[in-house]
Structure formats: C-alpha cells, structure tokens
Image (spheres, rainbow, N blue to C red):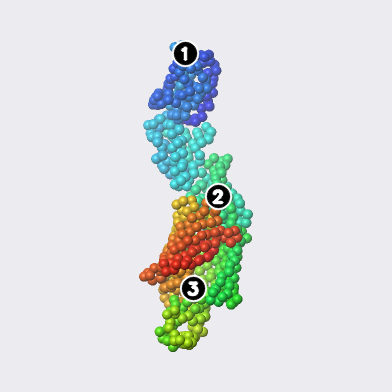
C-alpha cells in the first residue's frame, strides 16, 4: 500500500479547527502547563520541540499559535501527519503534537529524464537509505541539482513548486521506503521574434537550431544568439523565457534592436606629390531589403583620372544547405609606390655610377573575385574562390638617393638611369584559385568583439592552368582571440603569417606597414616572401557612452625572421549612425618621433 506525501496539510488544519471548536477544554482560558510530542520513532523529541515557538507555557491556549506550530513541525519535512490536541493536566492543559514520520528510505527511483542520466542526480542527495525521508531536504537538493544542470549542461528542469497535486506527481514514497521521483527536462514551446522592423523573420529563424517541442538546451540557445550576433545586423539581442500553462514547457521570446541598414562613407585624401585631392564615396547595405544580403559600392576619383571602384555582393544563404555566394568587382590604384622593394628596382646613375636611383610607380589591379562557401558544422566553414585579375605597374618618375653627389651646375636629369620609365612598365594576369577554412567562435556586443576566438587557414594557387605570368602558391593563416576581464574592458590579440612558394611577382610579395599591419610605419614599408605579424590591443569602452572606445596597441612583425619591426600607439573608435564605426590610430616606431595617423572604417581585427 502506497502513502501519498502531502506538502500542504490542509486536511490536518481542518481537523485541528474541528477539535478546537468542539472540545470544551480547549475553549476555556486554562493555561498551558506542558507541551509534548508523540508518535515519533527516529526523530528526536528535542528536534521537534525546537520548532514549537508559538505555544508558550504559562499562557492561555492560543488556537492560532497551535496552528503555526503545527505548520512549523510540518516544515521540518520529516512527517506526513502532524495532529495537535489538548488534554487536562494538573489543573491546566497539556498540548500534544502527535506526528507520523515519513517512511525510512530504502532506495531512489528516478523516471522521466531524457538527456540527463538519472544517476547524475544521486550525488546531490544528502539523504541516504536508512534515513527518514525529509521532504524539505529533498526539495533543496533538487533545487541545487537544478542549478548545476542549468549552469553546466544548459538544461532546465521544471521548477520544483506548485500545488499539492503537482508535488505529489513529482515525489512519491511508498510504505516500503521506495522514493520515486518523476523529473523531466524543460521543453521549448513557441519561438517568438520581436522588434524586427526591416529584417525578414526567416533571416533569423534560419540561424536557429532550437526546435519547438524539443528539449530546451540553454547552451544551444546561447550559441544561437551569438550566431545571430555574428550577422552584425543587430545592436542588441535579448532572449527571455516565458512559462506556459503546460507544465515543463517554456516559450522563447527574442527581442531585437536593429542596426542602421544603410551606411555611407565620405572622405577626401590629399596627395602632396600631385598636389591634388582624391574624393571618396561609399555606400553599403548589410541587410539588403531585409534579406540578410550584403551590397556595397565604393569609389575614389581625382583630377588625374585615378579611379578606384569596388562593388561587392554577398548572399549568405544561396540554398537550404547554407551555401554562400560572394561576388566582387574591383579596379584599384595604389599611388607613388617605391621600387626599392622590387627586384632590380635600384639603378645606378648614367654618368655617376656611384649614384643610386629608384622610381615611383602606380599599381593598378582590376578583376573579379567569385566565392562559394558552405558550413561543415556550426562554427567551421569551407570556402572556395576564383580570382581573375589584371595587374599594371606604371612608373611615374625617378627618385634620387639622398646621398647622391653631383658636380656644380650639372643637369641631374642627365644622370638618370639609361633605362626609360616606359620600358619598365609591366602588365600581366594574376589569376588564382583558393581554398580556405574558417573557424569562428567570436562573441559580440553590438559593434564590439568582446570574447571568443576565430581561426583562418588558406591556400591560393596562382598561374598554371588558370593563366598568368607567374606561377606560385600563397599560404596564409590567422588566429585572433578576445577576453573581457571587466564589463567595459577587452583585451584582444591577432597572430598571422604567410608564405609564398614558386616564382612570385614583386607586386604580390607579402608586405608590412600601414593601417592594416604595422601602424607606426608607412604602407609597404618592407616586403618578403614570408611574413609574421602580431597585434595586441587593450580596448576600453566608456560607460554611458557606448559609441566611444579608447585603445592602446602594440604591433610587431617581420618578413625575414632576422629583423623585427615594432610599433605602438593610441587610438579611439567612434560609432556614428549611418557611417558605422570609425577608427583613428596614432602609431609610433622606434625610429620615428612623430606619430603616423591611420584612419579606417571598422576594427583592424
């Protein structure tokens, strides 16, 4: 025969009121001269008597005080019944609390779990076979286990509370001491998305791996939210769980605050060599028509017909297999590069063989880049790319070394190298096929990377059957990681390297210097066929000014593993609506007293 354990003794309270109401002894003003307990076998009298604090010796009997003490004894958790009564005693009253102890525990049986092993609960139970079953202790132990499985496994078990019927369904103990616990993991009810004004609902729904009706895994929920943050479409994403009328089922509501979908960039660059201005204009839509597609267009133009053009389109979900498509069309100039880093880029004088000359040239790259990618799992992605590119190197003027010497009154142009600048012009194709792996577990807070890491490995095959003047291979890799010890403070670093194999063009060498590598040096300061670079940044966001971030940085790199170049400096990031995040860095190097100013949109890494 099984005994159902009741957590709320309504029946016994009713019985108490009945006894108190019909017993004339209790109805009088007789004093309480004794308080005793009866019926207990394993629970000591002292433990029970310590719970009786309202019924006082030497005072008239107070029915409400007896009811409170009855409940206090029940709250000890050891009893299935507490029944108070009064009897005459030495001219006064003796109040007796008759108790019925819970059965002695023989064993535990846990049913209903799917993902959590039943035996995983046992280490949390302080009660062992041979102990009188204690309801309060069991509820506390279940709550401790619930917190553990929530934090460590991301699994929720329904709250251990409710009416008598609910608790009886949760915990039952029979007369033989077999404790049966019916537990279950919480399940996901309905998914609701709120705050999507421009973004289509399917754009976020396709990133979710939680399934309605399945077990609710908080670790999966956290990964889903971070995956949505990696889309970089939202200022803020806030998930919250909402209980439903169905026990053990929780609805999930995700609230979104969208970023500006249309970003503009305007700028002017002054080139002192030409004494001209270059106008810059850019427009980007990272969420085209709310479909999650990215479209961007950037142009530069100056009076000397230098025209830079970049058009980019990306579709992250080309089909149900999450195949992505990227297309890029470009025509870019880099002005006034020095031939000092080119093979045979230094010449002797025509009349003074000891004099040295280099030349400034413009580099133009025009081409098309097509990329197809597909995820291998939630965080690992495989991308393939094909690039069709035309390279033009056009010399502009000779530059004499500062240590050159000339006779008084001599025409320096007569000493220019015998080779003509037009003969040094070079045009060729540099087509390539690429394969890369990207592992991304970065964590975002709005525009800012605040935690996690990512890794990139890639190989590009140039020339050969693809066509081109030079046949070579490019190997590259990058690892970056972020850590936030405090709410507004983030420490981040990046390590990257590359290696060229084969017959490599001078213009395709690996360069260091500029706003994307060593910020204290000019663009393309050094070049080589191998490269290693490390960047370290301490980023401090300003409380109550979310659009401002201060930065300390240190850069170190090499192209020969013999000489290492160092730069360091300070900077700040400022977020402007429509324009996005603007980056301003001031970098020094050991050989330069004045800082080099760097400006770009977005973080360097």
Circles 2 and 1, Cβ within 8 Å, touching? The answer is no
| Residue in the picture at 60% in, 50% down | 194
For disc 3, the neighbor class at 10 Å (few under 14, some 14 to 19, many from 20) is many
Whether residue 488 is visible to the viewer of this picture, yes or no, is yes
Neighbor class of circle 1 (other Cα within 10 Å; few <14, some 14-19, many 20+) is some
Q: Disc 3 marks which residue?
A: 432
**Could you tell me which secondary element the residue under label 3 belongs to?**
strand
The image's mark for residue 485 is none
Of the residues tagged 2 and 3, which is closer to the observer? 2
**525 to 405, vertically: above or below:** above
- Mark 1 or mark 3: name the one nearer the start of the chain: 1
Q: Residue at x 55, y 73 (%)?
A: 271
Closer-to-camera residue (60/269): 269
Q: CA distance from mark 2 to mark 1?
A: 65 Å
Q: CA distance from mark 1 to mark 3?
A: 104 Å
- Describe the element under mark 2 as helix, strand or loop: strand
Residue 505 appears anywhere in the view: no
Sequence-first disc among 2 and 3: 2
Mark earlier in primary sequence (2, 1)? 1
* Quarter occupied by residue 202: bottom right
Q: Residue at x 51, y 36 (%)?
A: 161
Q: Where residue 69 sits in the image (x, y, percent)?
A: 48, 24
**Is the residue 174 above or below the residue 381 in the image?**
above
Q: Which residue lies under the disc numbered 2? A: 238
Corner quadrant of residue 110: top left
Q: Which residue is mark 1?
A: 92
Marks 2,3: beta carbons within 8 A: no
Residue 58's spot in the image, x, y percent?
A: 46, 16
Determine the residue positioned at 47% across, 65% down.
587
Instruction: Single out the residue that lies furthest toward the left.
Output: 562
């Amino acid at each position: 025969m099984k005994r159902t354990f009741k957590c709320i003794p309504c029946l016994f309270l009713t019985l108490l009121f009945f006894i108190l109401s019909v017993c004339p002894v209790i109805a009088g003003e007789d004093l309480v001269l004794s308080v005793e307990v009866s019926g207990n076998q394993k629970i000591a009298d002292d433990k029970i008597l310590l719970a009786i604090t309202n019924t006082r010796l030497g005072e008239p009997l107070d029915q409400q005080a007896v009811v409170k003490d009855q409940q206090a004894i029940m709250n000890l958790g050891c009893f299935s019944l507490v029944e108070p009564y009064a009897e005459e005693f030495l001219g006064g009253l003796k109040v007796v609390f008759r108790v019925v102890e819970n059965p002695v525990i023989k064993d535990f049986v846990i049913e209903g779990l799917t993902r959590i092993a039943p035996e995983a609960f046992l280490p949390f139970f302080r009660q062992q076979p041979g102990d009188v079953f204690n309801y309060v202790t069991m509820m506390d132990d279940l709550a401790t286990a619930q917190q553990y499985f929530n934090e460590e496994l991301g699994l929720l078990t329904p709250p251990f509370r409710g009416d008598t019927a609910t608790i009886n369904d949760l915990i039952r103990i029979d007369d033989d001491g077999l404790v049966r616990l019916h537990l279950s993991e919480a399940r996901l009810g309905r998914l609701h998305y709120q705050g999507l004004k421009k973004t289509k609902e399917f754009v976020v729904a396709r990133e979710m791996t939680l399934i309605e009706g399945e077990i609710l895994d908080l670790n999966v929920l956290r990964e889903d939210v971070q995956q949505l943050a990696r889309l970089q479409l939202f200022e803020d994403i806030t998930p919250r769980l909402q209980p439903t009328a169905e026990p053990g089922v929780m609805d999930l509501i995700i609230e979104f605050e969208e970023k500006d979908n249309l970003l503009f960039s305007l700028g002017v660059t002054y080139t002192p060599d030409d004494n001209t201005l270059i106008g810059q204009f850019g427009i980007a839509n990272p969420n085209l028509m709310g479909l999650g597609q990215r479209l961007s267009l950037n142009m530069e133009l100056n009076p000397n017909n230098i025209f830079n053009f970049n058009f980019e389109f990306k579709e992250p979900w080309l089909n149900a297999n999450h195949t992505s498509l990227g297309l890029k069309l470009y025509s870019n100039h880099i002005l006034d590069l020095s031939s000092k880093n080119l093979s045979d880029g230094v010449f002797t004088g025509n009349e003074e063989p000891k004099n040295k000359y280099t030349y400034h040239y413009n580099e133009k790259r025009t081409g098309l880049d097509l990329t197809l990618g597909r995820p291998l799992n939630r965080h690992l992605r495989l991308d393939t790319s094909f690039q069709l590119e035309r390279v033009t190197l056009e010399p502009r003027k000779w530059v004499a070394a500062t240590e050159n010497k000339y006779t008084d009154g001599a025409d320096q142009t007569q000493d220019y190298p015998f080779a003509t600048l037009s003969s040094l012009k070079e045009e060729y194709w540099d087509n390539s096929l690429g394969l890369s792996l990207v592992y991304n577990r970065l964590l975002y807070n709005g525009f800012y990377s605040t935690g996690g890491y990512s890794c990139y490995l890639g190989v590009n095959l140039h020339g050969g059957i693809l066509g081109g003047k030079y046949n070579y291979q490019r190997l590259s890799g990058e690892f970056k990681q972020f850590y936030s010890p405090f709410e507004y403070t983030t420490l981040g670093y990046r390590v990257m390297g590359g290696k060229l194999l084969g017959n490599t063009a001078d213009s395709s060498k690996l360069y260091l210097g500029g706003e994307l590598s060593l910020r204290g040096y000019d663009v393309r300061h050094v070049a080589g066929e191998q490269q290693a670079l490390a960047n370290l940044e301490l980023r401090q966001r300003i409380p109550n000014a979310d659009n401002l971030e201060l930065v300390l940085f240190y850069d170190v790199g090499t192209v020969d593993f013999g000489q290492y170049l160092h730069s360091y400096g300070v900077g700040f990031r400022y977020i402007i609506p429509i324009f996005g995040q603007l980056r301003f860095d001031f970098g020094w190097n050991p050989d330069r007293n004045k800082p080099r100013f760097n400006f770009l949109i977005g973080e360097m890494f």
